[in-house]
Amino acid sequence: MAKAKDELSFEESLEKLEEIVKKLENGDIALDDAIEKFNEAMALAKSCDEKLKKAEKSLTKIVNDDGSLEDFEIENK
């Protein structure tokens, strides 16, 4: 049973996206199938983007001594 797009890891989503791109670039696919694969690829790309943004947001936090979190910002001088 295939995993839903939301259940795929970032790496699995990216791998599936790359497979779809190869199929579409090859050109040996019926138009209806190409449209279906394109829509699937767009959903995978959106999922990857959301996961990257979430990871970036969590990586820009600093844990204080009391365990609280605050945004990490670099001061430009």
Image (cartoon, rainbow, N blue to C red):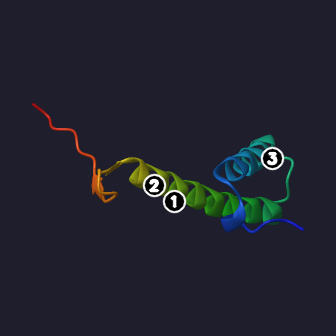
**In the rendering, which numbered label is found on residue 50?**
1
Query: Mark 1, residues whose alpha carbon is within 10 Å: few (<14), some, or many (≥20)?
Result: few
Q: In the figure, 70 relative to 6: above or below? A: above
Q: Is residue 57 left or right of residue 46?
A: left
Query: Mark 3, residues whose alpha carbon is within 10 Å: few (<14), some, or many (≥20)?
Result: few
Give the residue type that dot 1 points to. Glu
N-term mark: 1 or 3: 3
Mark 1–mark 3 distance (CA, rounded to whole Å): 24 Å
Q: Is residue 25 left or right of residue 48?
A: right
Mark 2–mark 3 distance (CA, rounded to whole Å): 27 Å
Q: Mark 2–mark 1 contact, CB under 8 Å?
A: yes
Using the rendered view, name the quadrant where residue 5 is placed. bottom right
Residue on which the image places disc 3 = 23
Residue name at image x 75 percent, y 69 percent = 4
Using the rendered view, name the quadrant where residue 30 is placed. bottom right
Residue name at image x 75 percent, y 51 percent = 16
Q: Secondary structure at mark 1?
A: helix
Residue on which the image places disc 2 = 53
Give x and y (percent) for residue 31: 79, 61
Using the rendered view, name the quadrant where residue 22 is placed. top right
Give x and y (percent) for residue 76: 14, 34
